[in-house]
Image: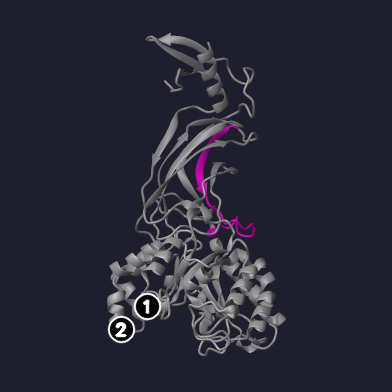
Amino acid sequence: MKAFQCIFLLLCFAGFSSATNHVTYTADDVTIFRNPERGFTEELGGETMLSNSSNHVVLAEADWFFDEEDETYEDRQYQTLVMLMYYLGNYRTKDLSNAILQGFDEDMQKLRDEGFKCVLRFAYDWNSNNDADLTHVQRHIQQLKPHLAANKDVIYVLETGFVGEWGEWYYSTHFGNESQHLNTNRRAVLTAMLDACPADRFLLVRYPLIKTEYLGDENALASAQAFTGTDRARIGHHNDAFLNEYGNHGTYGRDGDGPGDDPVLRAYIANESLFVPNGGETNVENTNLAKTVAKYDTTMAELKRYQWTFCGSTYSEKVTDRWRTNGAFDEMNRKLGYRYQLVHADMPETAQAGGQMTFQCTIRNVGFAPIYNERKVYLVLRNQGAVFPIQLVSDPRRWLPNGVETLINETLTLPSDIPAGTYQLYLHMPDMASSLSDDPRYAVRFANVGVWEAATGMNSLSASVTVTNGASGVCTQRTMNRPTKSLLNGQLVIERNGERYTAQGTRL
């Protein structure tokens, strides 16, 4: 009798039939398509010195950049990121004007309108090392802070910037020329930028030694430390000399204190970039060197090891043109950042309103990197216009790249007010920002055949569940038919609601 009661309670509280849909999905390893917060970037503002009368970067170049008829639009049709450079040289010795701050806000709104986000950097010049002094840099960062917060929904990552030519922390008038060394003034800029950078966005530094010296050790960020909001967890990396000689032009060097291309620093970035973004551009301008470093296999190995999530699509053409001819460009278009694929899933055929259902799904990430900014995953039940999203516990920032498969195995509670009916099932990964969450352009698309629904930004699981009216809390005999038991070929059989189960709960 006790055994029977246990089985009864098990079936009662489960609130679903043990019959399941098992679906296997077809991977799409060919199609190039847009996905948010990843991929190739194109730079805007590269030779624009802002002023009160010329206070835009995005709007100043919007006529051609977003024009589908422009001859350069073919590549941009797959992009969701733009590299924005704001050059503030006219304000080296004074506050930023209201016009500059207003122009920035208007640029961010244009990105929203067009379905883009940005990799963002501020600097003072592109052809000299004449930056501002520390006092004015700190003041400018303080002025920008509320505008960064107000527009964080369309800021993918923020690069530290401000110091030196191009804001790359190398040649500098006011901060010294040893880019890998964090002197007092450089440390003050990094501290100010960490304070101004929205807490749920990453701040990227140009050289790994900037981060290690700021933290006081060379211990790469560990899994348990990731996404915790600490400085260690928030500082990522950008490499603007990808594939170049001399340790990517000092990216992996110690500036005379060690090897010019230090394997310790390379390993550091390789380990870190599982949990913080890494991207940039190539600057190889030597034709013979480009022939060597831009080979398909060489490029793919570097992108995979250092988990690249974004890369400049044009500069330097010595490399990017070779990528276009040897197939690397298209493969990067597919694999920069994340590229999630559904492998197979198991879902129940029936479930009760207010009851529970199990959901199992295997997801493969064939991209070079994970997703980094927080994003929730929802199992969505839809019956015509009625939509019921159920948030999963699984964190997509933990869906590791380069072919790793992740199993989602969760028990979900259906809404108690969901009407009876048959519901199609979907996975939905919208943007976290309320301003973008309903915009399908900012939702994650899976790389499978026949699953993407462009109008809603959801991915079909090619399965349905029939929801019946039932218990929404404690199960009692009044809310469902009383089970009966019998023997069948010497085996105990329990019958409930017209269905039969073994004593172990297996449906017959």
Q: Is residue 279 above or below residue 467?
A: below
Q: Earlier in the sequence, mark 1 or mark 2?
A: 1
Q: Classify residue 240 by image quadrant.
A: bottom left
Q: Position of residue 62 (x, y in %)?
A: 55, 77
Report if residue 273 is visible in the image. Answer: no
Label 2 environment density (alpha carbons within 10 Å; few <14, some 14–19, many ≥20): few
Residue in the foreground of this view, choosing between 401 and 206: 206
Q: Which residues are magenta?
A: 420-442
Q: Position of residue 2 (x, y in %)?
A: 53, 13
Q: How many discs mark residues in the rendered view? A: 2
Left or right: 409, with 327 as reference point: right
Q: Residue at x 38, y 55 (%)?
A: 366
Q: Residue at x 54, y 61 (%)?
A: 233
Nearer to us: label 1 or label 2:
1
Residue corresponding to mark 1:
260
What amino acid is at disc 2? Thr
Magenta stretch: includes residue 436:
yes
Residue corresponding to mark 2:
287
- Label 1's element? loop
Q: Is residue 330 above or below residue 434?
A: below
Magenta stretch: includes residue 415:
no
Q: Are marks 1 and 2 in contact (CB under 8 Å)?
A: no
Q: Which quadrant holds the C terminus?
A: top left
Q: Position of residue 50 (x, y in %)?
A: 61, 85
- Label 2's element? helix
In space, the residues marked 1 and 2 are separated at their CA atoms by 22 Å
